[in-house]
Image (cartoon, rainbow, N blue to C red):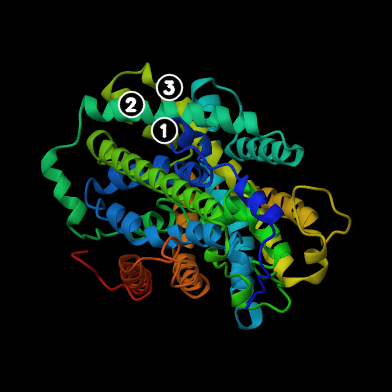
Amino acid sequence: MAQNPGRTPAEASEFDQLELPDRSARGLLRHFGPGIILMMTGIGTSHLVTAPTAGGRFAYALLWCLPVAYIFKYYGFEMAFRFTNATGKSLIEAYATARGKWPLWYVLVTTLIQCAIGQAGRLIAAAAVVYYVASEVMGWPVTLTGAAVGLGVVSVGILLMGRYKAVENSAKILAAIMVVSTLAVYFYQPAPFSEMGTFFLVEIPDGSWLVIAAFLGLLPTGMDVSLQASEWGKAKKAGMSRIRDRMEELGIARSFNPFSPRLRDLTVHTDRLPAHAQEYCRRWFQIGLWDFRLGHVVSFVMAAVFMLLAAVWLYPSAVEGQAVMGEIAGIFTNSVGPGMMGLFMFGAFAATFSTAFNYFDGWPRIVGACARNLFRGTARTAGIDRKQKGWYSEYNLYRATMIYSLIGSVAVIAGLPRPVFLVLVASALAFFIAPVIFFLNFYYCLVVIPKEDRAFYPSPFARWFGWFSLIVFTAMSVLLIFARVFDIPLFGA
C-alpha cells in the first residue's frame, strides 16, 4: 500500500487551490476536448462515404447497423475516458502490465498497418473532394493521387511545425456548417416515417458484408481511437492527469514503472485526497463523460441522416468511382438545387480533411506511447511536446511514424485509386481489430479502479451491459467472417 504520511498544511493548501471547472453551458463548451476531437475524427469518411454508400446501394436495409454500432461500442469508448480520469494515466500504461506486454505488441503492429491502409482510406476521402472540384468542376489536370499527396504533405507539415490550431478551428466551423445544412436538407424532405422500423430489422442483402463491416468498424469511429482519446485526455492535463505527478511525489499514489509494471501502481485511492481535490477530479470526469456523450449522439444523428438522405435521393446507385463526391453531393443538389453544391463541398472537405488530419497525429502518438512502455531508451526520452536526442526518443518516433503514414497511405492510394472501396476496406479493418481493444479497455477499468470508488468505478449496469456489448460485438465480427469466408447466408441474405 502506498505510504501517506499525512498532509502538511502547505500540501493541503496546494490541492485546495485547484480551480473547480465551470459546468455552465459556456464553461462546458470551453472545457470540451477529447470527446469532440473523437467525434470530429469520426465524422468524415464513415459519414460522408460509408453511410451514403449504404443508402445508395441498399436503401434502408442496413439502418440496423447504426444502433448496433453506437449502442454496443459505447462502453468500449467510455472506458477509455473513465480510466484516464480515474488514474491520470493512459490505457497504454495498463496494457504494459499484461504478460509479455502482448497488448502493446498487438496495438503497435495493428497501428502500423492502420497507418498505411487505414490512413489511405481516410486520406482518399478528402482527396476525392479536391479531385472532384478541381478536375470535374474547374477542369484542372489534377489526379486523385496528386490530391492525396498534396493534402498529406500539408497535414504532416502543419503537425510537424505545430501550427495546426487555426486549421483545426476553421475545419470545425466548416464542418458545423455542413451539419446544419445537412439537417436542413433532411427536414426539407425527410425519409418516410414508415421506414424507421428498419432500424430494428436485421437484414444482410447480397453484396453488403463489406459495407456492414465498415459500418461496425468506423461508426462512430474505430475502437482504436479510444486509445488516442486516452492519450489526448492525459495530455489535456486537467483533473486527475493534472495532479497525478504531484500525488506520486507526496506518496498519495504510487509511481508506475513500465519495466516492472504492476496494476496496483496505476490505482488511485481518491479518498486520500482532500475533499476539494476529490470534487475537482469528479467534475472533470463528469465533463469528460458529457464531452464524449454529446459527440456520440451528434455522430449517430449525422450518420442516420446521411444514410436516410442517400436512400431518398441516391437509391438505386452503386456510389463508386473517383468522382464519387459529386454523386454524393446529389443529395443536396437534387433536393434543394445546384446552389447547394458549393456548401456541401466546403463542409465535406472540412469533415474529411479533419479526419485525415487527426489520424496523422493520433496513430503516431499511439506508436510513441507503445514504444515508451516497451523500450527503455524511449522511456528515458518520453514526451512528444519537446525535442529529444536519439532516433528512439518518443518525439522522433512520433515524427518518423507520421512520415511513414504519409508515404504508406499515398502508396496504397496510388496502387488502388478507388475511394469507396479503400474507405470500406479501411473501415472493415478497424472492425476486426475492435473486439480486442474493447475487451482490454473494459477489463483494465474493472481491475485498476477501486471498487469502493463510486465516482469512477463502473456501475452495475455499465458492467453487465459492457460484457453483453462485448459478446454481441465479437459475435458480429465472427459471423461476418464466417459469412464471407464460407459463403453462409445470414439474416435473410
Q: Mark 2 packing: few (<14 Cα in 10 Å), some, or many (20+)? A: many
For the residues carrying marks 2 and 1, which lies nearer the camera in this image? 1
Which residue corresponds to mark 2? 332
Query: What residue appears at the point 78 percent right and 65 percent down from the top-left corner?
Result: 379
Name the spot of residue 146 as percent of width and height, x first. 64, 36
Name the spot of residue 264 as percent of width and height, x first. 60, 76
Q: Residue 343 bears which disc, if any?
A: 3
Q: Secondary structure at mark 2?
A: helix
Q: Mark 1 packing: few (<14 Cα in 10 Å), some, or many (20+)? A: few
Do we see residue 109 in this rendering? no
Quarter holding the C terminus is bottom left
Q: Quick check: marks 2 and 3 in contact, CB under 8 Å?
A: yes
Q: Quick check: marks 1 and 3 in contact, CB under 8 Å?
A: no
Query: What residue appears at the point 30 percent right and 52 percent down from the top-left corner?
Result: 66
Tell me the distance, in whole angstroms, between the alpha carbons under discs 2 and 3: 9 Å
| Disc on the earlier residue, 1 or 3 | 1
Which residue corresponds to mark 1? 25
Q: Mark 3 packing: few (<14 Cα in 10 Å), some, or many (20+)? A: some
Amino acid under label 1?
Ala
Amino acid under label 3?
Leu
Relative depth, front residue between 321 and 313: 313
| Disc on the earlier residue, 2 or 3 | 2
Amino acid under label 2?
Phe
Q: Secondary structure at mark 1?
A: helix
Relative depth, front residue between 100 and 52: 100
Taking 137 as reference, is 120 above or below it?
below
Residue 366 location, quadrant: bottom right
